[in-house]
Image (tube, grey):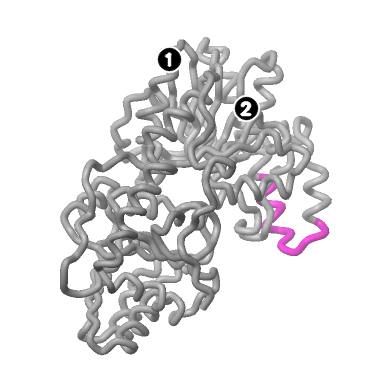
Amino acid sequence: MTSRKMLMVTSLYPYGNGETFITAELEHVARHLGHIEIVPGYYTRDAAPRPARQPLNLAYADGRWGALRAPRMVAALLASLFKYRWLPDFRLILKRPGKLANVKELVRALYRADMFERFLKRQARAGEGAYDVIYFYWLVPEILGAARFSRRSGGSIRVICRAHRGDLYEELKPAGYAGLRREIVADVDEIYCISEHGKHYLEQHYAHLAAKFHLARLGVNDPGYLNRQPGSGPLSIVSCSFVIASKRLPLLVDAIAHLLEADPALEVRWTHVGNGPLLEAVQAHAARRLGARAQAVFKGYLTQAELMDLYRNERFDLIVNVSDSEGIPVSLMEAASVGIPIVATDVGGSAEIIGGANGVLVPADADAATVAAAIARFADRAAAAAWRRAARRFWDERFNAAVNYDRFGRILAGLPCPPAGGEPQAVAPAHGDRVTG
């Protein structure tokens, strides 16, 4: 083990229920670093954090959200006006719709950058700032403050971040603008995208900085078992997502209804894992559209451990994801790790999970009939056994946490490491089936 010291900046982890895959990442990354501190950007004071082996540093969250939040924000904003190149962004905002929302986004980016730099200065004054690397789990404005602190400290601190989905794709922002994005991309040392799609997105928008964009896939641990294929009974479908509009669960309901109409002998059991603001609306839609030959089971929120217990104890023919946008769905990685094949829309990095005949891609704008046709392929369980073997094999090649996170730990520690598994140049051009409607 090296003596390198790393600060890892999260959104809430280890608080809340999100960022669940940080636990597996830290398990492997920690082997290559002497000391890791976790810095959540926010936490609920009366909530208990999830167990974590690494020490927590709550000083940034306390400074940003404490009783003196308002004056600290104003002070940071005023100071930031003299530190960061914000005028080009301001001029751009004036030429676009959504001016008020985008000005607010710019203001937030400015004060967050400066507040994080102030946090690092306080750490240094307290003798706690001798970090070798500051690693941001998300592409966030605080990166600017860390980069400026690094430069003013002699440039010896590497500033690295991951890029996922909502933090990466500017068009997903409420008014299509991410605060100080151009400055952040210019100042950060390296950006590790969780998908090839994300890496290509950055290369297209910032071609002159392409050398700092890399692929570092997420991964899930080997559960140590395979999901059992149903031998008889209803076609068993599982889905796993937050219940919001972009997940398009009503489309999945309509596809199941189409399946039942097309095959009077078919029965379907659909299990959905996840909650969200549209859960009751989806439940009502399922009650209206699905008849006696369909069961709709809503499990609500499950922890990752509870989800994997579900895959151990219940049998599923396939997992379905019909989102209209994605980064790269970890829910599909989890299903593949236990040998469950996939039907998914061709959005974001989903195509990177479906390869080697482990599933079926449908167009991003697929209708219910197209989704139903893809699902129907798995009704032949004898033929589907090959899809299940391919699902597990493809997970092992691309999304095995032990491999991916060990490699990323070496990157963070500045150690030599082999090329990433599943890089485009190292993989034969084998993809899952695609249907075009």
Task: State the residue position of label 2.
Answer: 146
CB atoms of marks 2 and 1 within 8 Å = no
Instruction: Tell me residue 309's x, y (percent).
Output: 20, 50
Q: Nearer the viewer, residue 398 or 58?
A: 398
Instruction: Tell me residue 223's x, y (percent).
Output: 26, 42
Q: CA separation, marks 2 and 1?
A: 21 Å
Q: Residues within 10 Å of mark 2 (few under 14, many from 20)?
A: many
First in sequence: mark 2 vs mark 1: 1
Q: Is residue 206 above or below residue 102?
A: above
Disc 2 element:
helix
Residue drawn at (16%, 74%) of the image: 233
Residue drawn at (19%, 57%) of the image: 228
Residue drawn at (55%, 17%) of the image: 132
**Toward which corner of the image does residue 220 lie, by quadrant?**
top left
Instruction: Tell me residue 286's x, y (percent).
Output: 31, 79
Task: Based on the picture, tell me whether residue 99 belongs to the magenta stretch.
Answer: yes
Q: Is residue 437 above or below residue 356?
A: below
Span colored in magenta? 94-107
Which-is-in-front pick, marks 2 and 1? 1
Q: Nearer the viewer, residue 236 or 100?
A: 236
Q: Nearer the viewer, residue 177 or 79?
A: 177
Residue drawn at (23%, 69%) of the image: 297
Task: State the residue position of label 1.
Answer: 34
Residue 231: image tag: none
Q: Is 208 on the left or on the right of 226, as rendered?
A: right
Residue 119 visible within the image: yes
Q: Residues within 10 Å of mark 1 (few under 14, many from 20)?
A: few
**Toward which corner of the image does residue 292 lie, by quadrant?**
bottom left
Q: Is residue 369 above or below residue 246?
A: below
**Toward which corner of the image does residue 160 lie, by quadrant?**
top right
Please state which amino acid type lies under the numbered disc 1.
Answer: Gly
Residue 246 visible within the image: no
